[in-house]
Amino acid sequence: MFVGERYTLLSQGDDKTCPVPYGSCKRDTDVWIALTVNGLRYHADVTRQRRRWPPGALAILCAGLAVASCQRRAVADLHPIAGQNVFLITIDTLRADALSCYGGAAATPALDRLAGEGVRFEFAHAHSVLTLPSHASILTGQYPFQHGVRDNSGYRVAPEARTVATLLKERGYRTAAFVAAFPLHSRFGLNHGFDVYDDRFGDTRAPTEFAMPERSAADMVPLARGWLAERVKAPAGERWFVWLHLFDPHAPYRPPAPFDARYAGRPYYGEVAAADAALAPLLDDLRASPRPTLVIVTGDHGEGLGEHGEQSHGLFAYESTLRVPLILAQLGSSSGARAGGEVSPVAARHVDILPTILDAVGQAPPPDLPGRTLLPAAERVSGSSPRPSYFEAMSAMLNRGWAPLTGVLIDRDKYIELPLPERYDLKTDPAEHENLFGRSAERDRTLAAALGAFATTPPGTRRAEAADAAARLRALGYVSGNAPAKARYTEADDPKTLVALEQAMHDAVDAFGAGRFEDAAQLYQRVIASRSDMAIAYRHLAFIEAQRGRLNVAIDVLQRALRAGVSDASAAAQLGGYLADAGQTAQAIRLLEPIAANADADVDTLNLLGITYARAGRRPDAGRMFERVLALNPQSSVPLENLGMLALDAGDLALARRHFERAVQADPRSSRAHADLGVVASRSGDAAAAIEEWKRAVQLDRTNFDALYNLGVTLAQRGQPDAQSYLEQFARTAPPSFYANDLREVARILGTLR
């Protein structure tokens, strides 16, 4: 580069005239050279300028600065291809340092190979440490305070939001999503723009169940591969965008064989390795495709694993939960991409993913997005202009009344705003052991001002989630409540001072999942004694008491919370459900009807009110409520199953069968729909068909105790030899609080069989 040559000003993107000779330039790679003049960063494409260099210029350039490196650096060959396909893979709860290509303990050969074919970003970050807000940022290219989703419950992506799916669909792309767990259910709004949004992970489980509906990577990957296989039959010019969400690394960690044995004592890493193994054939499919595909792999957030006192995620925003992997590659026999294996040190962000996708398919990103494309090599080298990144953790404030957490990353400097502020130099202290806040007032002010420049807004009004949604989130350890905002938060509200209570909440969830109900109840009681405004502790305690068959105690717990001044709208739906279960349907209806009267009432509340109407003998009202639910969520099997139950109770077997068959079409994995078809077959005199339906129901859900009882008893009546195993399974697993009479009958039948 010579004085007077034209080159690009990195921070502004326009051409400027070189004010200094080439000897003052810093050579970052063998492709790009860069320099800083008067505080501005410049670069030029060396390959285009090389013929104009005098002999020996390269040696002079390398020797000009001691910090420059002459070692070749791999640069991935990524470039826009108009109309190329796009495959986005998000792996829930995936720490960056878990993958072997990041130096992690999990063997991940499939993702390691993908990184070798493209670029791996070693310093990528999320903007939230929860599943739903983080995915909203990935798909919309916006920070949480822009798209408005601040927690896993109580928020929805706006119908008019621009997402990867809506933008690509406008450009003629077929769009499909396959999500593995409830936090990404279509009810939360991420389905906008998708032709197919497969969230059939078992949303038909009863509101009283604590198990979390999810699907493993071994279940998810074949769904995506099957959809792609159908695209082979489509017209040659068809383009597509697919989003595949895997949930395996999320707690509880239960890796399948052989990863359970291979990672004994380290089950989280076994889950990561299992997810990687499941992805291998899918990535091979994309490599073999005749059309190019941009593949992006990232995590939505990480996992604490005990660091900073956090076992899971959602409370803090340390690197263990905020830093994520990010891999980009172009696959396909016609992609034209050959070079790969690049490791980029730049600070990449989730908001950069949407601009990158649009750039890759030859479309200009909307100018109001905060992110930048990562496709050009110049954006991936050291010295590219910094990307400040906003992050937050709002769950503790929204659900517990603790202090909100916000922060900013500028290169390797990290600032966390809390009543007890924190600042870290991640270059020298990547594990964030040494809080530097207060060491340099000027640096503290600079980073605080950078955070303030984002002009964030507080979380808006959240809607109440109904009982079954709350139960499913609770099963993951996601505690939901509705704590009122405070005018001022003190050090006593700082999550760092309350982490022991957070651990107690998670220990209680684990205890309940292990069947240690009394231990869980005592933990929640201790939390309430320490912090009487913890609405979620009351709700969890009430849930446990209901599961123990102590409905009156559960009702008293929630009423005690109200007397203590806890204001939580979702508690009304929970209390209404328990009152209905206790036969107090009139009181339950009085609680639920005002909630259902709202235009934006949640479908779960509407469904619960419909069930309560049915229990009160108000079948026409129940039918209207279930039809309303069906209109709001036509892809759900739940309202169809409940309409079928109304028809069954009325003795209309033909109508009941039609509803249940539609329910199975909506969700082939619905255990309850198959069980109900078994009841219809039995009442129609077709015992053989009933047995097959009940076997299918039990296969899909071993906790469908009604189907298990019907199956065992019917087989015993017909003298079938396998009756005993089903009856013994019922005797071992059915909760006595709900099935005491049935357990006595099963014991009697087993006595005659032995």
Image (tube, rainbow, N blue to C red):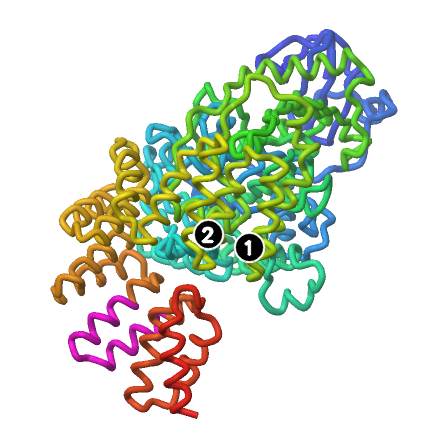
In the rendered image, which quarter is residue 169 located in? top left
Residue tagged 2: 180
Q: Secondary structure at mark 1?
A: loop
Query: Looking at the picture, which amino acid does disc 2 mark?
Result: Ala
Q: Which residues are magenta?
A: 675-697
Left or right of residue 39: residue 338: left
Q: Is residue 126 above or below residue 27?
A: below
N-terminal-most mark, 1 or 2: 2
Q: Is residue 378 above or below residue 577?
A: above
- Label disc, if present, on residue 248 of the rendered structure: 1
Residue 161 in the image: x percent, y percent? 37, 29
Whether residues under marks 1 and 2 lie with C-beta atoms below 8 angstroms apart, the answer is yes
Left or right of residue 320: residue 704: left
Q: Residue at x 46, y 19 (%)?
A: 368
Q: Nearer the viewer, residue 415 or 656?
A: 656
Looking at the figure, which quarter contains the N terminus? top right
- Label disc, if present, on residue 569 of the rendered structure: none
